[in-house]
């Protein structure tokens, strides 16, 4: 972490934010309620009145003032939760957002709203608490064997976030009417019409602050190593459970009221530490103050300039857009000791030889799955075997989808296998690198702001956004020689930019939302024959080029020093491979959207089958990727017939389940 002048204080940041908030508040009130007389406004009397005699006073008392108060409280709650998480896990980039707590709490509320609304009668924060706690426990279980190393924890949080996002998207696709009003809330809306939310959150926050103060001293001892803390009589495990439990409770209480407010829990502790709050006690004091003022200032700016914006922007989504650049700036300045993968135990170094029969079996499975996808379908009368006499219908509707699914699966599998071998990290994937999300951002912005959407325009915008993402990755990692852990964390920050934009788009009820959500979910529904054939042929060409990079990918998992000793120019090779991964992922994203768990699952399956050498690993991954996506696309058409689940979601749910189960071994 960079060191600033010791005389710098968090007050130098908080005071200007407080002044800005006060000025914007009065300007906002004067511009929207010009007839209000401040001299005649008796706050002490009118505040306790249930019915305001004047509309202007009612708006201020029951909308503006509660909104200001809830912004301060929610920001303070998330800032406090972020400090506790970072201290307990000794992880400078832990927060409710990066560890999946906020998204888990949201999913719990969505599930309860749809399937068990009676649970909400006991209190929405308890439902959110259960969802957030399950997500956090899952993240910790996945990274426990790596000693809760910062990269391991955050990457596990990314995987859990992706999986929860896939589940949430399934709910949204099939229950849009039920969740239409919830989309604004889920994106982080601070709109208020009474003081009920404030009165609900305030006592819980007060209790949380008191408890945090009581455990502050033993928590400060966690800055030592575990043996040192135990020698001072501290039960590290119990202390971690208490600290994490308190942070999850605070996050759940906030999320249950206003939805996901991204990155305040990360930004507040980091910025106050940069500004001189070195000790835990100082961060526990200043992070909630700064978090509350940061969220309030952001919300007031959105209210002030909402008329100039092309659409409504939820406050929570805006904080995510502001927080992701902070994370990008922060990553190169972090000292992540011990977070690099242990290459000596990496599964890429196995010497087992590929079995030719294995390739034959998988090619046979790929052929069978393609035939089934083309000729076997489900109708109102049951299962139907389509005969060749209906070949025109098959060629127009099913064949393009099979070709596109196979092409996308191959491209994603090649990208995933390449990035895993390049970083010597079996958790790596196009999602982690951020290329999928970067491409998706460019495409969504093009769809949203362009009046004449064409396929060439989408291709150009997608490719451009992919290469912009790549340029950011190169710029931020060039000085560290594309170090694996920093490269992956940079990808996480870039991927984090996608969720706020997605939330903004969903919250505005745009008439194109159905097509965009389907595309983001990985649907092949809109693919025509020329696009499907082009995707498949391009994937075949990419597979034919794999021998050119096989030697590089055999040497990189051995470690930087070994690769250099064997004559490999590591930095140049990694740069070339980054470009290759960007191209592969961008092309696949253009076909089936950004959800690409095939890039995670296919290389794992190929490696489990003994394909450890680079060339057979790449080819085996391509076969598995095509098999996975073709099967996922066919299953998505049949499971809930006549409704359809996009192939990307099926692959994410199946592949994500396997990956979460298998990730704990690494």
Image (spheres, rainbow, N blue to C red):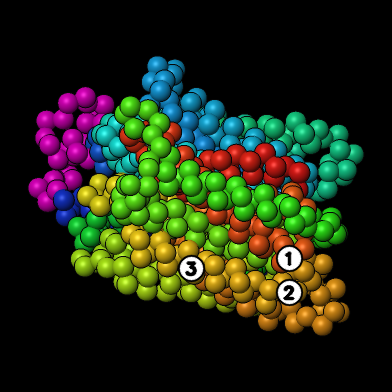
Asked whether 12 or 63 is in front, the reply is 63
Q: Residues within 10 Å of mark 2 (few under 14, many from 20)?
A: many
Residue bounds of the magenta highlight = 33-60
Residue 629 position (above or below residue 210): below
122 lies left or right of 485: left
Q: Quadrant of residue 242?
A: top right
Residue 456 position (above or below residue 421): below
Residue 324 drawn at (x, y percent)? 50, 60
Residue 520 drawn at (x, y percent)? 40, 52
Lower position in the chain sequence, tag 3 or tag 1: 3
Residue sitting at x 68%, y 53%:
360
Local SS, label 3: helix
Instruction: Determine if the magenta segment contains residue 49.
Output: yes
Residue 530 drawn at (x, y percent)? 35, 65
Number of numbered discs on residues: 3
Q: CA distance from mark 2 to mark 1?
A: 8 Å
Q: Residues within 10 Å of mark 1 (few under 14, many from 20)?
A: many
Report the residue marked by disc 1: 614
Mark 3 or mark 2, whichever is nearer to me: 3
The reply to whether callout 3 and callout 1 are in contact (CB within 8 Å) is no
649 lies left or right of 601: left
Report the residue marked by disc 3: 537
Instruction: Determine if the magenta segment contains residue 595.
Output: no
Report the residue marked by disc 2: 552
Residue sitting at x 82%, y 67%:
558
Residue sitting at x 55%, y 54%:
626
Residue 499 position (above or below residue 174): below
Asked whether 244 or 135 is in front, the reply is 135
């Amino acid at each position: 972490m960079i060191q600033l002048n010791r005389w710098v204080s968090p007050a130098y940041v908080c005071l200007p934010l407080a002044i800005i908030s006060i000025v914007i508040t009065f300007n906002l009130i004067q511009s929207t309620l010009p007839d209000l007389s401040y001299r005649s406004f008796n706050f002490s009397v009118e505040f306790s009145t249930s019915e305001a005699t004047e509309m202007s006073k009612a708006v201020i008392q029951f909308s503006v003032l509660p909104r200001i108060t809830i912004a301060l409280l929610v920001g303070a709650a998330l800032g406090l939760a972020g400090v506790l998480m970072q201290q307990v896990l000794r992880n400078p980039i832990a927060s409710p957002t990066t560890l999946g707590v906020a998204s888990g709490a949201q999913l719990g509320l969505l599930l309860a709203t749809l399937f068990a609304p009676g649970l909400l009668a006991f209190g929405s924060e308890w439902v959110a608490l259960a969802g957030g706690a399950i997500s956090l426990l899952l993240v910790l279980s996945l990274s426990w064997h790596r000693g809760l190393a910062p990269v391991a924890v955050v990457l596990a949080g990314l995987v859990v976030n992706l999986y929860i996002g896939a589940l949430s998207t399934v709910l949204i696709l099939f229950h849009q009417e039920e969740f239409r009003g919830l989309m604004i809330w889920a994106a982080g809306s601070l709109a208020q019409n009474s003081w009920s939310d404030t009165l609900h959150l305030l006592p819980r926050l007060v209790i949380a602050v008191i408890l945090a103060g009581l455990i502050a001293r033993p928590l400060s001892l966690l800055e030592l190593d575990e043996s040192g803390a135990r020698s001072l009589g501290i039960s590290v495990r119990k202390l971690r459970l208490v600290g994490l439990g308190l942070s999850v409770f605070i996050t759940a209480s906030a999320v249950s009221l206003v939805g996901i407010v991204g990155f305040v829990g990360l930004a507040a502790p980091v910025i106050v530490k940069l500004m001189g709050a070195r000790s835990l006690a100082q961060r526990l004091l200043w992070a909630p103050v700064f978090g509350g003022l940061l969220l309030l200032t952001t919300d007031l700016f959105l209210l002030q300039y909402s008329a100039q914006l092309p659409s409504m922007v939820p406050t929570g989504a805006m904080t995510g857009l502001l927080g992701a650049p902070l994370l990008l700036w922060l990553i190169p300045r972090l000292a992540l000791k011990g977070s690099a993968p242990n290459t000596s135990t990496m599964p890429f170094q196995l010497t087992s030889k590929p079995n030719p029969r294995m390739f034959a079996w998988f090619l046979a499975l790929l052929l069978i799955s393609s035939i089934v996808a083309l000729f076997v379908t489900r109708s109102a009368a049951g299962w139907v075997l389509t005969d060749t006499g209906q070949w025109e219908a098959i060629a127009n509707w099913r064949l393009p989808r099979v070709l596109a699914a196979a092409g996308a699966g191959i491209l994603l599998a090649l990208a995933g296998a390449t990035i895993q071998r390049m970083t010597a990290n079996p958790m790596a994937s196009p999602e982690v690198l951020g290329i999928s999300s970067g491409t998706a951002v460019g495409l969504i912005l093009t769809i949203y702001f362009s009046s004449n959407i064409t396929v060439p325009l989408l291709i150009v915008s997608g490719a451009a956004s992919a290469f912009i993402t790549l340029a950011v990755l190169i710029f931020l990692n060039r000085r560290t020689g594309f170090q694996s852990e920093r490269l992956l964390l940079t990808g996480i920050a870039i991927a984090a930019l996608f969720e706020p934009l997605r939330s903004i788009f969903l919250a505005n009820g745009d008439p194109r939302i159905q097509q965009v959500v389907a595309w983001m979910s990985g649907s092949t529904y809109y693919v025509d024959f020329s696009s499907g054939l082009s995707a498949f042929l391009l994937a075949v060409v990419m597979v034919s080029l794999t021998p050119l990079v096989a030697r590089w990918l055999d040497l990189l998992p051995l470690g930087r020093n070994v690769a250099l000793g064997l004559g490999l120019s590591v930095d140049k090779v990694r740069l070339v491979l980054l470009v290759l991964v960007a191209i592969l992922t961008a092309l696949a994203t253009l076909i089936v959207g950004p959800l690409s768990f095939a890039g995670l699952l296919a290389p794992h399956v190929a490696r489990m089958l003994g394909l450890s050498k680079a060339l057979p690993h790449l080819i085996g991954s391509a076969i598995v990727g095509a098999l996975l996506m073709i099967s996922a696309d066919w299953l998505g058409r049949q499971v809930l017939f006549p409704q359809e689940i996009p192939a990307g979601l099926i692959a994410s749910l199946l592949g994500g389940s396997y990956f979460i189960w298998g990730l704990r071994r690494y």
